[in-house]
């Protein structure tokens, strides 16, 4: 029977299936080599080679076989790899196309799939009942770290995650369309044909390699006079001709979000042996559709009976798919256990293909006469009102025990495969994710879409419309409704198998009195018994039952198990199913890789890296960088043999003794322009601005309404109606946002505009006693003398022939200039200054030296010395509050009782008794280290450095009542010592401030 | 002494492939223009065009283009030497703010049959011709960067961003183009 | 991802271009320095944050840059309208509100935890 293609498996049936027998590929499974046909899934290829045993179960390590033929597969989870870096665990064999050279491995077994030591758990079943972990790993607490957690970690989780970096890349695509059709079975294809003809933008996606859904395995239905699969081929060919239709196979819609946003994951190269390295491995589509058409189909339910999980026991519809689509017989001697008409057509197809069907065991007493006649014609025995009550066979089912539903006599059948047909569960997952409400339909025992909240429509079997003719009509109507236009021509359909009849909950042999393992959730090893136990133990909400038993919580999210779990819980609770309710459907519909979610945002695109115009110079001169927000800032410039400490010491000394050059380009800058600019500045900053003359600078403090410091920076008045405002590096966006907020919503009538100029200007700080001497030769049109350009002044002119806003200011306590030049000139101007400065002892200094130099002067850094609870008074900049102002942001906050109270934490200096000890930033300060624990904390260290210039350590602390405690001793308890220190002024260097005026 | 040279943030980059070409735009004069209603006519006249008042529209005349960014905000892009800053600042009617952003911003022209797909790798906007016709512009995002997107032709876009984001935007578009 | 109508750009645009800015129609007192602590508390700290129809501020941050207001149902996430800053607080009609309500519970499906919790309290 396997005549023409013997090399791709003994179970290939000549003349069956849609795969070209000419193309074969080879792969390995657990080290053994097999051949397959191109187009096979791993599951069909294994079954063709007689392999049912595909894995071990999660908890009991029971041997498990391939159960289905689609994405709902709970058992056959396989580790797939191309090479050591390209390995993915937990791939469902039923959806993974075989490619040449594929390496497949079973999971959750040791040492081998057929002999697994973990299977001892199976015998210990009564110890592993629902809630086992909750009940067992309770005490002693110490055992958590050493025993329980390592054990649980080892036992939990399926598969092994890859340990090499992922060499592939992933893509993202935002797309917009008129109609998105999810699912390309009969209904989806028909909807796409109708919508496509309108010329509107249509996207149709389907999770499978080949579109067509159930049509591809339907040997009896006819559409437009053609066999179903042929019609599907024609439909696909027509869609391919339509420019306005995007056809996405291997693409799963996994999430449905607000306002008709649906996310899809497209497997771009998973089916290709040697993919082009430029192709992304997966692509995430974020589709916004005017109308979403859900044609997601239905999933066949299994039957809950004792030992219903042996390899060789599988879904009836899956067997039909393997036969009609892949040309593979799942067994040679196949029994069918059903409560649904659709399983009969499976038995008939198999029988016609030469497979022995010893019996159809149907739970129902009354069965459609046409089915019975056809069975009789084919010589198939039908047992009406019978149940399968037991199975045998360790690694493959070999025998079943059959008993009348209402009787005792047991009959045994020798078989090599048992098919189950428990009815169909419409896939309402996406509909439910869209926040649509479902309603329980007693007639069919299913939840069906009821109330829509998004602009979508369910058609076909996901809507409970199971017969082909009705589904096609529903599809045409939905598509026409979505795109308008004339009603499409009716499609002539000769219906094939009917899908009536169902069973949910436990079947005979798995009832409350039976001590048997009848699985409802294969992947998490949950049995009917476990659900009943959970209800007995007091879990009455289905959400609680789910979490306690873990039913439906595996990676298949209970696609097959949920209805059974619900029905058994309802029975145990003695409530009708709709009263128990469904658990919530959540995204993703099927597991999605991190790659899909990450898309382009990996490697150097993980986040934006902002670099200043002088960045390359810093690199060339050996700088180490620190991240400040998204910026890379030069941290220090180590010379040969220097560590960070030595480099920073040298940079600080050089700056104080000669000069330093510093890249301050990252500072935020905002140009405030308009006749109401002063008024606006008065409102936003605590300072008064009216009297700041043109050409002058002032240090400004900005609070929030609560009176706490929000940002600070030096502000230049360039004209009556124009300010150049600087902000902290990290604060730039939020400061501008807050300013815009006040301007647009509180003071929209004020004539003033804000423009971010952070990146318009490169800022070169030149600081130190020789600063003026160094830059003077480069500057044109500005008198740099102390008289003409005194400390805190600004003048516009030229440097190196390009425009500059040259500010005389200092964040170091030395004579200093901040030279703003248009950014593209930054590097060349920097180089020109450095060339002149180097012979005079000038050094570039980084952010670390900048921090030390400013701390020596007691200058604060917002966000380091303040934390959102510090007022200007607390931070010694109360002088920056305009006392006569009647309003500014924070004026009321600053009057609040707590903010004016005595004894607040205030910023002061701290000198350690041993000047060599540098305190740790963040260290807590206490008064009495001998106080009983817990010792009251009175403050903490905000900044702490070694000051090379002062030859001692310096620190700033926020400490209770600090301003009134100068000279007092406090303690800083550290793990190995208690450090003594004295509270002092935070200005350690040049307290008179003469040096800035040099 | 020679004047300091200008270094373009995207100097000497090229990308082409898979139906997408990226080209850095050379130096331009750029003004962030803010104005009240009374000033609009005069400001437009000063640079030889009419400032667009409709959201998301652009008006170009010769080497000068005005992009509507917000209800009182335009981005003026002009060839070097147009001296639009001086011209705008001479206007006497109405109130306005002229701020040069010629070094803050830089731009990339994205063109080719797959240009839309490359952009939609990171830009969530509907870039169909119906939703975003030739001549439309808007501030929006690409990946994690803010940009101003301006459709020059059916398959050609001007992508304007701040200079320190330009390396990211360039690399993002190159990566996206590969899988367009 | 929401689709938000910007009243200045006059288009429905993706949420990622926008930034939520909290509750709308809270005016900053014009006599800020003179208000009582209780008034300040109400102005600065107290927000409704209720389930149902909310008036909220958005900024089209990565777009036209404008602040504007919206009326949205915080459960269904559907907008009744958006409007420019400074426009008087609108009064949505009964019809407006009905159009954005989350669907009535046709069955207890999807809500079992809450149903149970309520029952448990009795």
Image: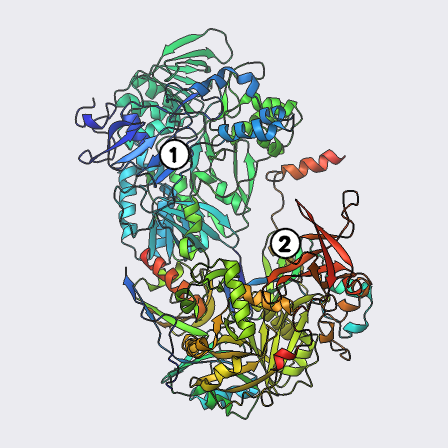
Q: Which residue is mark 1?
A: A92
Residue A140 position (above or below residue A906):
above
Task: Please state the chain letter of the residue tagged with numbered disc 2 in the rendered image.
Answer: A
Q: Neighbour class for label 1 at 10 Å: few (<14), some, many (≥20)?
A: many
Which percent across, then down, holds residue A217? Answer: 32, 33
In the rendered structure, which disc, 1 or 2, sits on the residue that comes first in sequence?
1
- Between C33 and C106, the residue placed more toward the observer is C33
Please say whether residue C60 is visible from this viewpoint.
Answer: no
Callout count? 2
Which percent across, then down, holds residue A348? Answer: 32, 23
Q: Neighbour class for label 2 at 10 Å: few (<14), some, many (≥20)?
A: some
Give the residue displayed 44% in from the left and 77% down from the top. A839
* Helix, strand or loop for disc 1: strand
- Between A752 and A690, the residue placed more toward the observer is A690
Residue B59 position (above or below residue A503):
below
Quadrant of the image occupied by residue A288:
bottom left
* Proximity of marks 1 and 2: CB atoms separated by less than 8 Å: no
**In this rendering, would A299 be left or right of A539?**
left
Task: Please state the chain letter of the residue tagged with numbered disc 1 in the rendered image.
Answer: A
Q: Which residue is mark 2?
A: A920
**In this rendering, would B152 be left or right of A128?**
left
* Helix, strand or loop for disc 2: loop
Give the residue displayed 66% in from the left and 44% down from the top. A976
- Between A43 and A249, the residue placed more toward the observer is A43
Which percent across, then down, holds residue A779? Answer: 47, 86
Please say whether residue C120 is visible from this viewpoint.
Answer: yes
**Could you say which disc has been placed on residue C13 in the image?**
none
Q: In whole angstroms, how far apart are the C-alphas of marks 1 and 2?
A: 53 Å
Quadrant of the image occupied by residue A802:
bottom left
Q: Which is more foreground, mark 1 or mark 2?
A: 2
């Amino acid at each position: 029977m396997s005549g023409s293609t013997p090399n791709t498996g003994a179970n290939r049936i000549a003349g069956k299936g849609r795969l070209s027998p000419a193309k074969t590929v080879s792969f390995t499974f657990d080290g053994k080599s097999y051949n397959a046909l191109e187009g096979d899934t791993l599951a069909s290829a294994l079954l063709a080679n007689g392999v049912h045993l595909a894995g071990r179960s999660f908890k009991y390590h029971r041997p498990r076989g391939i159960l289905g033929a689609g994405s709902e597969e709970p058992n056959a989870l396989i580790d797939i790899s191309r090479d050591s870096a390209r390995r993915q665990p937990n791939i469902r064999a039923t959806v993974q196309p075989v490619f040449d050279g594929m390496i497949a491995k079973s999971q959750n077994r040791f040492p081998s799939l057929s002999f697994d030591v973990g299977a001892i758990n199976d015998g210990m079943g009564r110890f592993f009942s629902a809630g086992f972990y909750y009940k067992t790993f309770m005490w002693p607490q110490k055992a958590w770290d050493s025993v329980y957690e390592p054990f649980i970690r080892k036992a939990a989780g399926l598969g092994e995650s890859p340990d090499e970096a992922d060499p592939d890349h992933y893509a993202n695509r935002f797309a917009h369309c008129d109609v998105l059709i999810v699912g390309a079975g009969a209904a989806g294809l028909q909807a796409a044909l109708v919508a496509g003809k309108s010329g509107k933008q249509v996207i149709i996606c389907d999770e499978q390699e080949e579109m067509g859904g159930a049509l591809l395995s339907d040997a009896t239905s006819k559409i437009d006079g053609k066999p179903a699969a042929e019609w599907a081929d024609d439909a696909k060919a027509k869609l391919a001709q339509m420019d306005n239709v995007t056809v996405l196979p291997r693409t799963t819609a996994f999430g449905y979000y607000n306002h008709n946003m649906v996310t899809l994951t497209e497997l771009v190269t998973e089916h290709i042996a040697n993919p082009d390295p430029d192709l992304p491995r997966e692509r995430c589509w974020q589709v916004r559709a005017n109308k979403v058409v859900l044609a997601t189909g239905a999933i066949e339910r299994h039957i809950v009976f004792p030992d219903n999980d042996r390899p060789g026991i599988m879904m009836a519809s899956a067997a039909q798919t393997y036969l009609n689509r892949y040309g593979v017989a799942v067994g040679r001697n196949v029994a069918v256990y059903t409560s649904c008409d659709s399983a009969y057509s499976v038995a008939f197809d198999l029988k016609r293909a030469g497979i022995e069907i010893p019996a159809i065991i149907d739970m129902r007493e009354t069965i459609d006469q046409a089915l019975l006649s056809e069975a009789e014609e084919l010589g198939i025995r039908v047992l009406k009102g019978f149940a399968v009550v037991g199975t045998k066979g360790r690694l493959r089912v070999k025998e079943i025990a059959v008993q009348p539903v209402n009787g005792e006599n047991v009959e045994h059948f020798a078989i090599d495969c048992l098919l189950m047909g428990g009815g169909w569960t419409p896939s309402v997952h996406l509909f439910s994710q869209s926040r649509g409400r479902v309603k329980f339909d007693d007639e069919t025992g299913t939840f069906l879409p009821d109330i829509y909240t998004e602009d979508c429509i369910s058609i076909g079997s996901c809507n409970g419309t199971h017969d082909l003719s009705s589904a096609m009509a529903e599809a045409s109507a939905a598509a026409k409704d979505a795109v308008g236009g004339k009603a499409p021509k009716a499609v002539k359909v000769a219906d094939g198998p009917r899908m009536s009849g169902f069973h949910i909950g436990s079947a005979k042999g798995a009832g409350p009195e039976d001590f048997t393992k009848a699985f409802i959730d294969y992947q998490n090893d949950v049995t009917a018994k476990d659900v009943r136990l959970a209800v007995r133990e007091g879990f009455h909400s289905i959400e609680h039952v789910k979490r306690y038993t873990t039913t439906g919580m595996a990676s298949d999210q209970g696609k097959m198990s949920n209805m059974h779990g619900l029905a058994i819980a309802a029975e145990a609770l003695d409530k009708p199913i709709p009263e128990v309710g469904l658990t919530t459907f959540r995204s993703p519909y099927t597991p999605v890789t991190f790659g899909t979610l990450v898309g382009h945002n990996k490697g150097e695109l993980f986040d934006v890296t902002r670099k200043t115009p002088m960045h390359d110079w810093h690199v060339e001169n050996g700088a180490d960088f620190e991240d400040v927000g998204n910026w890379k800032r030069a941290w220090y410039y180590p010379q040969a043999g220097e560590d960070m400490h030595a480099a920073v010491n040298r940079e600080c000394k050089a700056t104080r003794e000669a000069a330093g050059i510093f890249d301050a380009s990252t500072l935020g800058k905002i140009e405030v322009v308009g006749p109401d600019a002063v008024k606006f500045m008065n409102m936003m900053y605590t300072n008064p601005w009216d009297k700041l003359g043109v050409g002058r600078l002032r240090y400004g403090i900005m609070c929030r309404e609560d009176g706490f410091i929000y940002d600070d920076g030096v502000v230049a008045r360039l004209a009556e109606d124009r300010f150049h405002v600087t902000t902290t590096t990290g604060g730039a966006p939020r400061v501008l946002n807050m300013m815009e907020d006040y301007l647009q919503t509180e003071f929209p009538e004020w004539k003033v505009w804000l423009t971010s100029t952070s990146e318009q200007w490169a800022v070169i700080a030149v600081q130190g006693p020789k600063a003026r001497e160094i830059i003077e030769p480069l500057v044109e049109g500005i008198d740099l003398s102390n008289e003409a350009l005194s400390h805190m002044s600004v003048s516009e002119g030229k440097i190196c022939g390009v425009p500059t806003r040259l500010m005389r200011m200092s964040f170091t306590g030395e004579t200093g200039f901040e030279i703003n030049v248009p950014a593209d000139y930054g590097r060349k101007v920097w180089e020109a200054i450095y060339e002149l400065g180097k012979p005079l002892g000038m050094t570039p200094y980084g952010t670390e030296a900048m921090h030390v130099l400013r701390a020596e002067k007691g200058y604060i850094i917002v966000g380091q010395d303040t934390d959102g609870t510090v007022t200007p008074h607390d931070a010694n900049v109360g002088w920056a509050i305009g006392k006569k102002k009647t309003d500014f942001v924070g004026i009321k906050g600053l009057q609040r009782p707590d903010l004016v109270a005595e004894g607040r934490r205030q910023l002061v200096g701290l000198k350690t008794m041993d000047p060599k000890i540098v305190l740790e930033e963040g260290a807590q300060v206490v008064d009495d280290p001998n106080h009983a624990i817990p010792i009251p904390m009175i403050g903490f260290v905000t900044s702490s450095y070694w000051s090379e210039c002062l030859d001692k350590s310096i620190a700033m602390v926020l400490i209770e009542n600090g301003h009134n405690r100068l000279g007092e001793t406090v303690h800083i308890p550290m793990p190995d010592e208690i450090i003594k220190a004295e509270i002092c002024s935070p200005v350690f260097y040049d307290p008179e401030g003469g040096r800035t005026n040099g | 002494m020679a004047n300091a040279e200008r270094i373009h943030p995207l100097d000497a980059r090229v990308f082409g492939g898979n139906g997408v070409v990226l080209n850095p735009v050379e130096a331009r004069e750029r003004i962030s223009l803010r104005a009240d209603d009374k000033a609009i006519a005069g400001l437009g006249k000063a640079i030889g065009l009419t400032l667009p008042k409709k959201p998301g529209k652009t008006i170009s005349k010769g080497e000068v283009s005005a992009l509507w960014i917000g209800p009182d905000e335009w981005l003026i892009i002009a060839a070097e030497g147009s001296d639009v800053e001086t011209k705008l600042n001479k206007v006497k009617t109405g109130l306005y703010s002229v701020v040069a952003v010629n070094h803050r911003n830089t731009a990339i022209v994205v063109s080719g049959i797959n240009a839309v797909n490359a952009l939609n790798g990171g830009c969530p906007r509907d870039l169909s011709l119906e939703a975003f016709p030739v001549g439309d512009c808007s501030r929006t995002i690409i990946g994690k960067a803010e940009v101003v997107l301006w459709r020059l032709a059916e398959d050609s876009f001007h992508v304007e961003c701040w200079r320190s984001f330009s390396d990211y935007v360039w690399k993002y578009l190159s990566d996206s183009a590969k899988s367009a | 991802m929401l689709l938000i109508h910007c009243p200045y750009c006059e288009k429905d645009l993706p949420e990622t271009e926008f930034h939520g800015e909290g509750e709308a129609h809270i005016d900053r007192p014009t006599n800020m320095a003179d208000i009582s602590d209780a008034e300040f508390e109400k102005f600065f700290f107290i927000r409704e944050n209720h389930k149902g129809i909310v008036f909220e501020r958005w900024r089209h941050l990565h777009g036209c840059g404008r602040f504007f207001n919206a009326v949205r149902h915080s459960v269904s996430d559907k907008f009744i309208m958006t409007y420019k800053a400074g426009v008087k607080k609108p009064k949505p009609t009964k019809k407006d509100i009905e159009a954005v309500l989350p669907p009535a519970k046709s069955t207890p499906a999807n809500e079992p935890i809450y149903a149970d919790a309520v029952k448990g309290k009795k």
